[in-house]
Image (tube, helix red, strand yellow):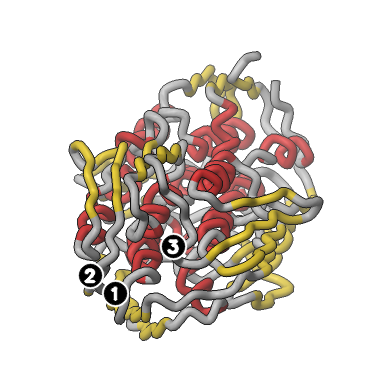
Amino acid sequence: MKNYIQINNKINSFNEKIEVSGDKSISIRCVLMASQAIGLSKIYNLLESEDVMNALKAIRKLGIKYRKRKNYIEIQGFGLNGYLTKKKIEIDAGNSGTLARLILGLLVNVDNYVTITGDKSLRKRDFSRVTKPLLNFGVNINSKDNKLPVKIIGSKYLRPINYYEKLGSAQCKSAIMLASLKAPGITKIKAKKSRDHTELLFKNLKIPINIKRKKHYDFIEITGQNNFSGFDYYVPGDISSSAFFIVLTLISKKSKLIIKNVNTNKSRIGLIKILNKMNANITFKNKREYKGESISDIIVKSKKNFIGIKCPKSLNSSAIDEFLVIFLVAAKAKGVSTFNNLSELNKKESPRLNIAIKFLRMIGIKVIRKKDNIKIYGNPNLELNDFYEINNFRKDHRVFMMSCIAALTLGGKWKLSDKDSVNTSFPNFFKIIKKLGAKIN
C-alpha cells in the first residue's frame, strides 16, 4: 500500500464542528501514573496513537495489566514498588520522547536492568538532560553518547535531590518528579516555565506536592514514598492536534470552525496568544475546569490581513509543538515576524527549525536565520502553482500534517510521503480533514 498522499486542490469554504483526539501528553502521563497507583484506574478518551499504545505496552512488560473496555482503558496498579523486573527487559518507546524520558523516572527503584530504546529518529535525540539528574538519585544508568538505548537499574537507597531545570522542558521536569515519588524525603525542583500536566495530576491524586509559581520559574517540592489510589480520568482534546485545523481555518476563505472540548491549559495556549497577536480571530467558549485542567470549545474564523510580530520568548514553551503551523501564518502575514530562542525545535522528532526554514524557502518565503533566531518576511498574497514534494523529514508527524495544511490553503500540487506518520499522535487526522471537505488522493 502506498505511504504517500497527493493534494491537487485547495480546500473549499467550510462551517463545521469537530472534536479532536485525546491529549497525547496527558494520555501518556495517565497511563504511567495508573501503573503506579494502588488499585484500578479507568482512563476515558485515551488517545489511541502509536505513542500511547507504546506506553501501554511498556507497563505491560513491567508486569502491569490493562484491558480495553468499550469506553475506557482499565489499568491495575500495585503501587510505587509494583513493577516486576525479575529478568532483563527492553522497552521500545517508538517515536515518543515523552514516554522514553518519563518512564526512566519511574524505573529508579527497579531491581534488574531495563533498557529503553526507540525508533531511528528517537535514537538521535539527547537524553543527558534526563539521565544526568536521575543519576543523582543514586541509580545506575548507562548509554552511549547520551542517546538511546539507555540501560537503567534502580537502587534500594535512593536519595532526594535538588534540581534546576533551565530548559523549559516538561519532559525533563516530569521525569524528575516521577523519580521523586520513589525517594525518601523532599525533592526540590526549580523549573523554567513549561506545561504543568504532571503537577496537576499529582495534586489531583493527593500526592504531597507544594508549588510556588514565580514569573519565570516554578519552585516544586515533592515528598516521596507516598502511595496513591487508582483513579478515573477523562482526557480532554489535544490542542496540538487542534492547531492544524485552527490554522487551516484561519488561512482558508470564508470558513468557521468550532473545536469542542479542548485542553486549554494556560501552559499550552501559546499558539492562541501568538496567532491572536498576528490579528487572528480565535476565541474560547464554554470554559470549565476538570481536575485542574482548563477545557474550552475553540471558535476560529478565517481571517485576512495577518500582521507580522516580534514573538515574545516567554510564549515559546507553551507553543513548542505548534511553531510549524505558526510559521505558515507568518508566511501569509504583512511585514516581518521575528522568533527567537528556538533551539528546542531542533530537539524534537526531527530538526524542526531547520526543516521549517527549508520548507518556507521552498514556497518562496524569505527567511533570515541567526543561530536559533529567525525572521520570516511574510507575503499576504502568497499563492502557489508549482509541484512540491515532501519526502525527507524523518517521518515527523507534525511536519507531515503542517505540509497538508500548506497544500490545502496555498495551492499548487503536492506529493507528501510517510502518511502513516500521523499514527504517532493523531490517527483521526485524515478522517477529520476529509469531513471539512479536503480532497486527498
Name which of mark 1 and mark 3 comes first in the sequence: 1
**Pointer 3 with pointer 2, Cβ within 8 A:** no
Q: Mark 3 Cα within 10 Å, few/some/many (few <14, many 20+)?
A: many
Left or right of residue 44: residue 212: left
Which disc, if any, is residue 189? 1
Which residue: 44% across, 83% down? 208
Which residue: 58% across, 27% down? 419
Q: Is residue 396 in view? A: yes
Which disc, if any, is residue 318? 3
Name which of mark 3 and mark 2 comes first in the sequence: 2
Q: CA distance from mark 2 to mark 1?
A: 6 Å
Circle nearer the viewer, 3 or 2: 2
Q: CA distance from mark 1 to mark 3?
A: 19 Å
- Find numbered disc 2 in the image and state the secondary structure of the residue it sits on: strand
Which residue: 30% across, 35% down? 124
Q: Amino acid at mark 2?
A: Tyr
- Find numbered disc 3 in the image and state the secondary structure of the residue it sits on: helix
Residue closest to the eye, 264 or 21: 21
Circle nearer the viewer, 1 or 3: 1
Instruction: Check disc 2 and report the residue beneath it.
Output: 164
Which disc, if any, is residue 147? none
Instruction: Residue 163 in the image: state x and y as whole percent.
Output: 23, 70
Residue, far top:
1
Left or right of residue 61: residue 194: left
> In the picture shown, does residue 263 fall above or below 243?
below
Which residue: 22% across, 52% down? 140
Residue, far front:
86
- State the quadrant of the N terminus: top right
Instruction: Residue 362 in the image: state x and y as whole percent.
Output: 41, 27
